[in-house]
Each structure stands twice: as C-alpha cells, then as structure tokens.
Amino acid sequence: MPIARLPLPARQSLRSALCRLDRLERRQALLLGGALGAATGAALLWDGGWAGYAGFGMALLLAGGLAWSGEPLPIEAGPAAAAEPPDPLWADIPAGSFLMGGDGQPQRKVTVSAFRCQRTPVTRRLYREIMGSDPGWPGGKADERPVNNVSWFDAVEFCNRWSQRDGLQLYYRIKGEKVLPIPDADGYRLLTEAEWEYACRAGSTTTWSFGDDEARLGEYGWFEANSGGTPHPVSRLLPNNWGLYDLHGNVWEWVWDRNGDYSEEAQTDPQGPPEGIGRVLRGGAFGFGPWILRAASRNRVRPDYRFRTFGFRCARAPRRQP
C-alpha cells in the first residue's frame, strides 16, 4: 500500500513526527526513527505489502540517523509568528538627538528621551468624552476631526481629566493660571516643543517630515490648497516615518513651552524658558500655506486664547509605565 493510501490520521501523525525530528536531541531522533519504522511495518504486515512498509521503516530509521549525525532535515514551515499589532492611539518614540532650530533661531543639538506620543491630535469625540462638551468649529456632532477652539489652559486641564479617568497620576498641578508639571507622574501631558519637532521629523532633516518636495504636501497635510477652509478627520492622509499623522496642517498644536529664543548650547529634554508671554504652537493649520507647515515653523499665542485653528495632541511616559 503506498503511503498516499494510508488513512488520513495516520498520514498526519507520520508527517507530524517527521517535522519534529529536527527538534529532538539527535539520539532521541534515532530511536524515534527506528521505533516508527518497526511499528509501521508490524502494524501493516497483514496487508501483504510488508516489503514496502519495511522500506518505509528503514527510511524513517535513516531519517533518525541523519538527525543524529547533524544533517538538516527538510520540514514543512509553519505559519510565521504574528507581529504585534501597532497601538492605534500611541506611538513609541525612541530616544535620540537632532538639530533643532532654523526659522530665525540658532540650530543646536537637542537630545530627547523616549516617550509615547498620540498618533493624531485629540479629536472632538475624545474631547467631549473627557470634558463633557465639544467646542469644535464648525458645528455638528463631535467626530474624528481634531478638536479646535481650545486654549492652552483647556489642553492641560484635558490632560489631567483624562489621566484621572484612566487611573493615572496627574501630570499637572493647576492652581488658577499657575501650572506646574510633576515630572515623575505617569499621566497624560502636552509634548514639549523639542519633543514635538523631534517626533515630527522622525529622523529627517528636510523642510517637511517627508522631504523637500512641496508638491507632496497634500499627501501628508491639510492646508490652504486642499482643506476647503475647514479641519478634516484625523489620520486620513499619510503618516510620517514614526506613524504620526496630521503633523503638517489641520490644526496648530499647543506644546508645553513658553515662547522664547532658543539657547545656542546643546540641551537634553529642554522645557523652554521659565518666563515669557505666550505659549508655543506647532505644525500650522488648515488655512495656511506650505511655508507655515514646515517642521521648524513655530507660532506663539497667549495661553488663554481660543481660535478655530488651535488644537493639541498628548504625550506620556514610555511603555514601561502602566
């Protein structure tokens, strides 16, 4: 009886045994080969095909001997291990250094520690879920458009309320208009200006995160040429190399830093000047031209101002935090 005529369970068992030969220690493989050969020949001798089964048993014995001698055995490849799916909300930003500056400011080396960054700006849906209201323009239901019409104070209050809902330590101590960070807290927070530009560039040194070709800007960002004068749902265009969306255009994004001149000295995790009028916004917005959407471009506004082009995204400590 040919092997193909063996009952299906028998064929499957033999195939499985062969596939395991290379995983056993060599002496075990030899013994398994001989045992399988003898058992197969004895069990099927009644069929009259004893010679064929004896030959099959010898083949298994030989397979065991090859495994013992160190010769590779052909095995059927199993399915590849499934890659861990990316977190749809957060991207893990690696530590690293880059040259920060330009736009009238001196360039200097800035080193940024690892952190987690929201892949998109905070949406109107999430903002309403946390804050109980949707200030977004234009009107209509809260959806996946980035929240706008929010001040810097609104943004830090949102971070604390989101942290509270998720059982995390509040990152900000807020007393009136005085806001102090609690650096060891694991709650949600705004990106610093250095973190924002580092995450936006994603290793690039070009005008925009994707390169210097202005003709491609519409593939990555909503701006005056393609937005129709309104914000659009997040993550509809291409991400940068670190999986972050809507960094060029759609809405300006509040960051932690006060406005001020850059230092010319190399820095690690800079937090911006301790004093200053206005907080920094980054990224440009739906009603602006390509030059304003550059990775190095910056804006500054009083932290209590709200406007239809102002939004934000959040950050938090690296993945090792709960």
Image: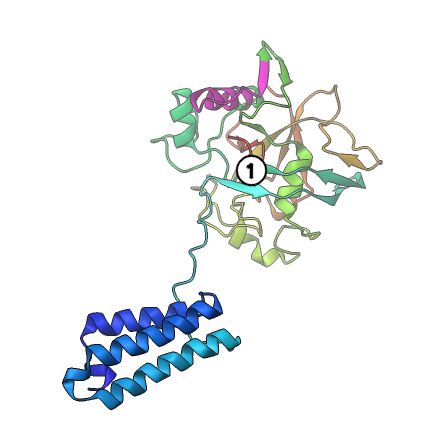
Viewer-closest of 23 and 298: 23
Residue 141, quarter of the rendered image: top left
Viewer-closest of 195 and 255: 195
Q: Is residue 57 above or below residue 209?
A: below
Disc 1 target residue: 117
Q: Is residue 173 above or below residue 264?
A: above
The magenta stretch is 156-173
Viewer-closest of 278 and 131: 131
Q: Is residue 21 above or below residue 258?
A: below
Q: Which residue lies at the image location 79% right of the left edge and 35% below the top edge?
A: 267
Q: Is residue 160 left or right of residue 34?
A: right
**Residue 302 forms part of the magenta stretch:** no
**Residue 160 forms part of the magenta stretch:** yes
Q: Which residue lies at the image location 46% right of the left edge and 46% below the top edge?
A: 235
Q: Which residue lies at the image location 62% right of the left edge and 50% below the top edge?
A: 209
Q: Which residue lies at the image location 65% right of the left edge and 47% below the top edge?
A: 201
Q: Position of residue 229 (x, y in %)?
A: 48, 41
Crowding near the residue tagged with mark 1, few <14, some 14–19, many ≥20 C-alpha atoms within 10 Å = many
Residue 281, quarter of the rendered image: top right
Q: Is residue 303 left or right of residue 169?
A: right
Q: Amino acid at mark 1?
A: Cys
Quadrant location of the N terminus?
bottom left
Q: Position of residue 69 (x, y in %)?
A: 52, 77
**Tag 1's secondary structure?**
strand
Q: Is residue 151 above or below residue 119?
A: above
